Amino acid sequence: MMHRSLLVRLGLPLAAMGTLASCAPNPGVAAELGGVRVSESAVDAYSRGCVEVLDEMGIAGNVTDGDVRRNVVSWAASGLIADQLAARYGVTIEDADKRAALASLQDGAQFAQNPECGRALDGRVRLLALAMRHDVGEVSRDAAAAPVIVNPRYGTWNGAEQIVSGTGSLSSPGTGGS
């Protein structure tokens, strides 16, 4: 699937990272963790920015809107997890940590240069930076326990890879999977 290869190109699967998901009770919310939400309007903006980057790369026609939206929801949800865990650990993710994490992602700098797409990608970057700065095993375990809620229109939260997977449906609730 194209969304999967896009994630692989960016080096984003943090294979040891967590699992847990359920359906979103609010259709205006793309993802939620601990009362902190990623809105559908934010996903719209992030997606537009990422499509611009894909267009610059000459591959926008190879990626569906659904693929792009699942990726940006995945990235933003990773940021919710990173923020929650960093606060729990008392760890501050420094700019240098984020630069190192971003540098480790194939094509990450190109996606980050677009302001809107970069806001979404920053979530994934923060989670990777936290894993690099703190104990990766602890981050993996705690990320696995994070009760991320994803709007079922996107699919289900795949905690093993920290991505939204599947094609999604408005008529079936999102359920956890790994």
Image (tube, rainbow, N blue to C red):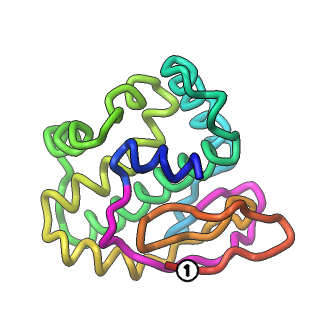
Could you say which quadrant of the image residue 29 lies in?
Answer: bottom right
Q: Is residue 29 magenta?
A: yes
Front residue of this view, candidates 147 and 9:
9
In the displayed orientation, state which residue is furthest to the top.
Answer: 56
Can you say whether 78 is above or below 47 in the image? below
Locate residue 47, reporting x and y percent: 61, 36
Q: Residue at x 18, y 69 (%)?
A: 136
Locate residue 72, reporting x and y percent: 54, 46
Front residue of this view, candidates 168 and 124:
168
Q: Is residue 70 magenta?
A: no
Can you say whether 117 is above or below 170 in the image? above
Left or right of residue 70, residue 66 in this image:
right
Amino acid, disc 1: Gly
Locate residue 19, reporting x and y percent: 45, 78
Left or right of residue 90, residue 63 in this image:
right
Q: Which residues fall within the magenta stretch?
A: 13-31
Q: Residue at x 50, y 33 (%)?
A: 117
Left or right of residue 77, residue 167 in this image:
right
Q: Residue at x 81, y 75 (%)?
A: 172
Number of numbered markers = 1
Q: Residue at x 37, y 43 (%)?
A: 10
Q: Considering the numbered disc 1 on the image, is that residue within a helix, a strand or a loop?
A: loop
Front residue of this view, candidates 154 and 28:
154
Dot 1 crowding, Cα within 10 Å, few <14, some 14–19, many 20+: some
In the displayed orientation, state which residue is furthest to the right.
Answer: 171
Front residue of this view, candidates 3 and 41:
3
Could you say which quadrant of the image residue 46 lies in?
Answer: top right
User: Magenta span: helix, strand or loop, mainly?
Assistant: loop
Locate residue 87, reporting x and y percent: 27, 65
Could you say which quadrant of the image residue 92 lies in?
Answer: bottom left
User: Which residue matches tag 1?
Assistant: 177
